[in-house]
Each structure stands twice: as structure tokens, then as C-alpha cells.
Image: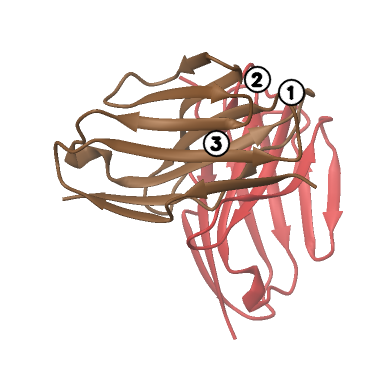
Amino acid sequence: SQTIHQWPATLVQPVGSPLSLECTVEGTSNPNLYWYRQAAGRGLQLLFYSVGIGQISSEVPQNLSASRPQDRQFILSSKKLLLSDSGFYLCAWTDNDYNSPLHFGNGTRLTVT
Amino acid sequence: TQLLEQSPQFLSIQEGENLTVYCNSSSVFSSLQWYRQEPGEGPVLLVTVVTGGEVKKLKRLTFQFGDARKDSSLHITAAQPGDTGLYLCAGETDKLIFGTGTRLQVFP
């Protein structure tokens, strides 16, 4: 069966520090991978998605970047965090079928102080 | 910009009551998904509806896709404390657009 791992679960970082959140998927090949950010108790905003190694699409220009160095690894990064980067970050995957549902990780709660 | 508005935003009810959550848009979707999210976890898919007018049932939950595929509803019968969570609809066009969310609290 497929599983998705996202870490860390919580993170407190000072303003101006770098960020690296990692997500890996097991049990599937060539998944579509996504990074979302969720405002407190609300809907999800798509940040980045990837349909293959090295292929990254950005939905919202901001202080973040994403990379996909391996087929089942997706990394969210920042060189210098801003206060406004605080939030709940979710990684997700789908297979390549149309209407395939999203399978989410358990998220990372990031607090920038 | 495509928007999916959910209503109500918050809902607090007693165990045993019925409720309906609405998901509305001016856009037409090829399909619509409903997710439930518990605190500190990622959303989990409940159902996908594809055909206009389609109704799907999942135990006490009934999902309906509007005839024009612009809206959807989720009806819960005899709510239980285990139904507590954030309910999110998500409509698919060329991408998946998430709704604004409905936070449900069911008290015993």
C-alpha cells in the first residue's frame, strides 16, 4: 500500500533563517506531488506541484521554492523565512489518473518568530 | 479567479441533529471531491462525485452534485461526535480548487 511521510511535524524558526521540509511517498511510481499551505482551519492554497523529477510548477509567487530530486521525494525550501510564512504545510500525492484523489501527509506546523 | 464558497463557515450542534453543508461556485467542475480533516492531520477523501445530479451515500453522509456541476451539498443525518472536523470540498477543472471549509463541532 502507498504511504506518504512528511517531516518535521512542527517547526519553530526565526525570521531570516532557511527552511527545508521534506516529503516522501512509498508504494507508487511517478506520482504527481503537491505542496499546499492551509490558513488556520480553512481551505488549502496550492503552492507547487510536480509531475516528474525536476519538473516544478509554481502557483503562487512568494518566498518559497520546491524541488523534486527523486521520483518520490518533494522538498519545500526557503532561503530566508518571513513572518508571513507561518502556517500549516501539507504535502500530497496523486497517481496520474484523471480525477485521482489527493492523499495527504500529516502536515508540518511552521511558526516563524 | 475560481472560488468555491462553503457555508456555513462554522457549525456547532448536538449529537443526533441533522445538518447540511453547501459548496457553491460560478464555475463548472468536471468532478467534485469532499474531504474531512481532523486537527493536526491532513485531509482524507470522503467521496468524489462526477455526474451532474449524482447522489452518493456513505453511511449517514449523503453527497449531491448539482445538476449544472457548479455546486454540491453534504448532508449528515443524526450527527455523532466522531463527525467533528473540518469539511472541505474541492472542484476539479484544469486544477483542483479547494473550498473555504466548514468546521463542524458535534457535542455529546
Label annotation for residue B98: 3
Q: Residues within 10 Å of mark 3 (few under 14, many from 20)?
A: many
Q: Looking at the image, do the residues carrying marks 3 and 1 touch, with CB atoms under 8 Å apart?
A: no
Q: Looking at the image, do the residues carrying marks 2 and 1 touch, with CB atoms under 8 Å apart?
A: yes
Q: Residues within 10 Å of mark 2 (few under 14, many from 20)?
A: some
Task: Find the distance from the CA under tag 3 to the CA under tag 1.
Answer: 14 Å
Which comes before the other along the chain, label 2 or label 1? 1
Task: Identify by letter the chain in brown.
Answer: A
Residue visible at 57% across and 20% down in the picture: A50
Element carrying mark 3: strand
Q: Which residue is mark 1?
A: B30
Label annotation for residue B93: 2
Which comes before the other along the chain, label 3 or label 2? 2
Amino acid type of the residue tagged 1 in the rendering: Ser
Tell me the quadrant of the picture where the C terminus of chain B can be found.
bottom right
In the image, taking residue A82 as reference, residue A101 lies left or right, namely: right
Tell me the quadrant of the picture where the N terminus of chain B can be found.
top left
Residue visible at 61% across and 42% down in the picture: B89
- Determine the image quadrant of residue A58: top left
- Determine the image quadrant of residue B96: top right
